[in-house]
Amino acid sequence: MQRIKNFQIDEYILEALKEDINYEDVSTNAIYKTDKIARVTLLAKEDGILAGLFVFKRVFELIDRDVKFTDYKEEGDEVKKGDKVLEVEANIATLLTGERLALNYLQRMSGIATNARKMIEALGDENIKILDTRKTTPNMRIFEKYAVNIGGANNHRFNLSDGVLLKDNHIAAAGSVKAAIEMVREYSPFIKKIEVEVEDLDMVREAVEHGADIIMLDNMDIDKIKEASAIINKRAIIEVSGNIDLQNIANYRGLAIDYISSGSMIYAADVLDLSMKNLRYVNE
């Protein structure tokens, strides 16, 4: 499981809090008159995989350092409708102010983790790993890619500095697959693998001939993927991509490929329905 530290996420959460609270929480301040402590329960309203519990908690901790949590479920757990996930105890204003943002993170991340798990199960092939892409929500990438990992899938490169991927427009700008690979070899440190996106069998041959480490077969049908795999013949890692989602991923089961990358694992994920309920004052 990935580990994310508070210093990596606090800036994002604080910006989100500033977005949600311009200068005051009018609704809470209107009714909040005394310094009372309350407890509220986080409940699952549908089945899924939990991801982002630490982010949920961090929202409240950044508002109020005295907040307390009682855990009933852990990160990565499967939950069923009606399950109690945790309880939050804090000043009533803290609970009311932090509720929506904390849920936004947790619901979104848990929805992605749940979608990732469903895609793994739908593929049903332990020899092929499923990857995410850079098709993430701006300023949410660290949360969304973490959720993919919690769901059991894998991360592709995190950002443009993380690896070399020569896509169609890179190749067009360079003039050919061969030229693009040569330019990267001249420019990039030797520790960087070179991945090349190809759209037809001629490009596959060119990428293999000039030593691409990873070849991405983009938007090829199953028969073309089989032909391309035979041409590559284990001389490069094979990734398949292009409009692959929960509905069609089973079509790729059993192919001689290493990875499937799918942007829909993140951008098409539904949120997991979770809710904070049964707010009650402590010691009353």
Image: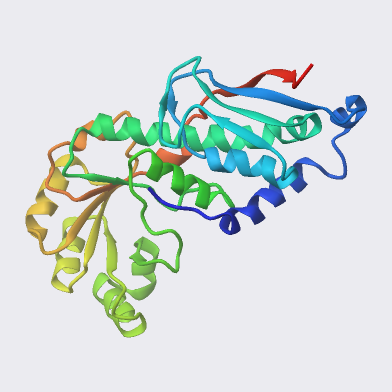
On the image, the x and y values in percent for residue 85 come to: 52, 25
On the image, the x and y values in percent for residue 263 come to: 40, 44
The residue located at (20%, 44%) in the rendering is: 128
Q: In the image shown, does 35 or 236 lie closer to the viewer?
A: 35
Quadrant housing residue 205? bottom left
On the image, the x and y values in percent for residue 161 come to: 44, 69
- For the rendered model, the colour scheme is rainbow
The residue located at (28%, 64%) in the rendering is: 196
Q: In the image shown, does 269 or 21 lie closer to the viewer?
A: 21
The residue located at (83%, 27%) in the rendering is: 36
In the image as oriented, which residue stretches furthest toward the bottom? Answer: 186
Quadrant housing residue 252? top left
On the image, the x and y values in percent for residue 226 come to: 11, 46
213 w.r.t. 201: above or below? below
81 w.r.t. 54: above or below? above
In the image as oriented, which residue stretches furthest toward the front? Answer: 283
Residue 263 appears in the rendering: no
Q: Is residue 31 left or right of residue 162?
A: right
Q: Is residue 231 left or right of residue 250?
A: left
Quarter of the picture holding the C terminus = top right
Q: Is residue 134 left or right of residue 187?
A: right
Residue 142 appears in the rendering: yes
126 w.r.t. 79: above or below? below
